[in-house]
Amino acid sequence: MNPGRPNIIIAIDGPAAAGKGTLSRRLAAHYGLHHLDTGLTYRATAKALLDRGLPLDDEALAADVARGLDLSGLDRSVLAVHDVGEAASKVAVMPKVRRALVEAQRAFAADPPGAVLDGRDIGTVVCPDALIKFYVTASPQGRARRRCEEVIRGGGTADIADIIADLQKRDARDAAREDSPLRPADDAHLLDTTEMGIEAAFEAARVLVDAALEH
Ligand code: C5P
């Protein structure tokens, strides 16, 4: 590693099930960077409240839980369930919770040689000075199909109409909140994964990252 070189930060935002996670993991592996799925930090905060039978709308309490979170202990398999995602998008509207989690996410990004972070507000709030930013989208049908396949691969059953309704509800809440709403940063590259497979999305992103690294 070059000690004079600033950390490499790749910011990836977009709505649920657009392919951010797979793309982020591929980019992190390719460039030897850390990876943080910031959605897991909101999910872990929500799950800790649910597990203790605590309300989801007590901001001071939720912020305390968020401050106590250990990012090294985030377990995707327990946090991926639907009810936790729904609860996460409720705690995510609270500014004090966001402040606590954003601080932890920035500390993660500061660890050399840098990181790929994916979420909803990485390019706009968490890492506005990222080397490069992507906003990953896909049609509601494309995203629902992807989410359906994930559920079925995990041994569950899924109804595509229910999933579309659910994704739309969550997107609306994420885009309408006052603090850090879901939106592309002005300097983000848009990647629509509806038609392109994840491999093509990765290739497109890689070419842009390589060009940014050469500057
Ligand atoms: O991406 P994932 O579905 O795991 O995120 C769960 C919820 O956490 C989202 O619906 C969103 O409300 C919230 N979130 C957020 N900011 C992020 C990442 C996730 O508000 N950077």
Image (cartoon, rainbow, N blue to C red):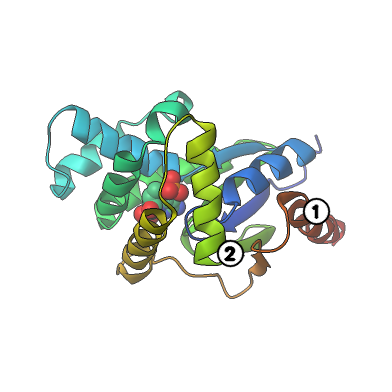
Residue occupied by mark 1 = 206
Contact check, label 1 and label 2, Cβ < 8 Å: no
Q: Is residue 215 visible?
A: yes
Mark 1 secondary-structure assignment = helix
> Where residue 187 is drawn, which disc sits there?
none
Vertical arrangement, residue 202 with respect to residue 135, above or below: above
In the image, 213: left or right of 109?
right
> Where residue 138 is drawn, which disc sits there?
2
Q: Is residue 66 visible?
A: no
Inter-mark Cα distance, 1 to 2 = 19 Å
For image coordinates 25% across by 55% down, the residue present is 94
In the image, 103: left or right of 184?
left
Residue extending furthest toward the bottom:
186
Q: Position of residue 212 (x, y in %)?
A: 80, 60
For image coordinates 64% across by 61% down, the residue present is 133
Q: Position of residue 98 (x, y in %)?
A: 33, 52
Q: In the image, what residue type sits under mark 2? A: Ala
* Image quadrant containing the C terminus: bottom right
Q: Nearer the viewer, residue 2 or 80?
A: 80
Q: Nearer the viewer, residue 147 or 201?
A: 147
* Image quadrant containing the N terminus: top right
The tally of labels here is 2
Q: Nearer the viewer, residue 10 or 198?
A: 198
For image coordinates 52% across by 63% down, the residue present is 141
Task: Rate crowding at label 2 as few (under 14), some (14 to 19) or many (20 or more) other CA atoms within 10 Å.
Answer: many
Q: Earlier in the sequence, mark 1 or mark 2?
A: 2
Q: Nearer the viewer, residue 146 or 109?
A: 146
